[in-house]
Amino acid sequence: MPVRKIAIAIALLLLHGCIKSEDFDTPNKNCSASLAPNTTFKAVKELYKGNLLLITEDLILEGFVISSDQAGNFFGTIHLQDAAENPTAGIQLLVDLRSSYLQYPLGTKVLLKLKGLYLGKQKGAFVLGGTFAAFGTTSVGRLPALKIPEHLLVVCDNPVQLAPKAIDLADVDSSLTSTLVQFSRVEVITAEQDSTYAVAETETTRTLIDCNDLTIKLLNSGYANFQAQKLPGGSGTATGVLVRERNNMFLAIRDTTDLFFTQEECPDLITEFTTDSFFFTELADPNNNADARFIELYYAGNETLPLKGWSIVRYTNANTEVGASLDLSEITLTPNSFLVIAKDALEFEATFGFAPNLEAGSNSPADSNGDDNLFLIDPFGTVIDAFGRIGEDGTGTNHEFEDGKAVRSLAIERANSTYDFTEWTLYNDTGDSGTINQPQNAPEDYNPGVRD
């Protein structure tokens, strides 16, 4: 055999022997295998004392990339969290780098060399980066592109599959800022279901709501490549990075696949209720102390009653338009309980020895001088209970309690949408129309919180 053919055969044999398998990964020539982390996200954040900080220690932080600028919804920032699943903390690195997803794909484990970086807060969120000076102040700015490889090093592992932290909207708080989370059974609010993700070239928020009527804002860039797409219908899971802006938390998706809506919309949640077991029992205008005025109502029902949407309105004197209203939405009643509403809470407590359930203030329904008309309104706009008649000044009528009080009969256990004088005993300073001319003084002539 000629020497040339022998040499070629040997070369082919050696080449074949070096290839043990055709299934091999291309090594990452830019990865780091020699460094090890020596600090934690918590420890880094504790370095911040309220002012911009240049980190001078040789600290190395390990994290996982959870954001991506591939779809354009993130720009100039890379969000890192401390674990691929069940994270406990996250942080933002500000970078002057376009298409960062090519060098730092989702799920990439990285080492962040902190020496020479600046630590600060922007809109309440912790950020790392270079510096930015404007108008005489210096803050954390984007790390220049040429500096990024010196600080953000890819670990020589393949990117991992990130597992978003499953939480409820009720559990959202600032400790989860810059972490990857997932909400289940959420949908776009009805008013925005025909909207696009964002207005062109404008940062836009859209609202997600869950089946318990809790909400979170979806933060979308007007430059994202999905900006003009319609928001999805139905309900399902929403995955994204929690972003903090001062006291508000937002969800930022990486692309539209983060909204995986395959279920029907949530059924309507009934949070507003009506009943005729809630009614006025005493109206007070003390002769000796106008600041001790109050309204007492009683709930005779046997189940807890949230007063979302309920209100009390006052028609002053002979007016036919509402002069004052009081929203009761924050109140929840327990069975067989009173709701005492004072004009002035401090004066009421000083006079009667206990605090009222609610302070209504001056010129409120609780601040009637005895010749006004009061109505209890349910969440659906229906008059549930009435005292007086719209358009009729109470002076000299059978619904005047000036300098006195109006007390509901103990026999009454249901509201009445039409005023009925026979259900009441009225004390005033005139005694007209069947009322009692006997001004009342506080505290001795009143017993708020008790039916007697």
Image: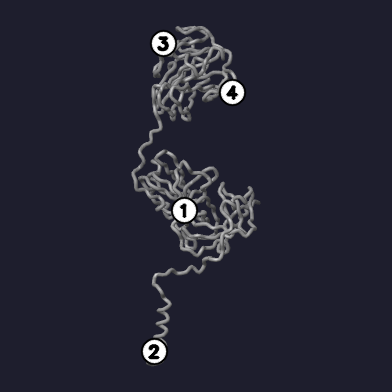
Secondary structure of the residue carrying tag 3 is helix
Q: Amino acid at mark 3?
A: Thr
Q: CA distance from mark 1 to mark 2?
A: 57 Å
Q: Which circle's residue, 1 or 3, is located before the other in the chain?
A: 1
Q: How many marks?
A: 4
Kindly identify which numbered label has been placed on residue 5. 2
Q: Which mark is residue 422?
A: 3
Residue 85: numbered disc? 1
Residue that label 4 marks: 346
Say which amino acid is labelled 2.
Lys
Of the image marks 1 and 2, the number of the one nearer the N terminus? 2
Crowding at mark 2 (Cα within 10 Å: few <14, some 14-19, many 20+) = few
The x and y percentages for residue 418 are 39, 17
Distance from disc 1 to disc 3, alpha carbons, whole Å, reads 69 Å
| Mark 4 residue type | Leu
From the image, state whether disc 1 or disc 4 is nearer to you.
1
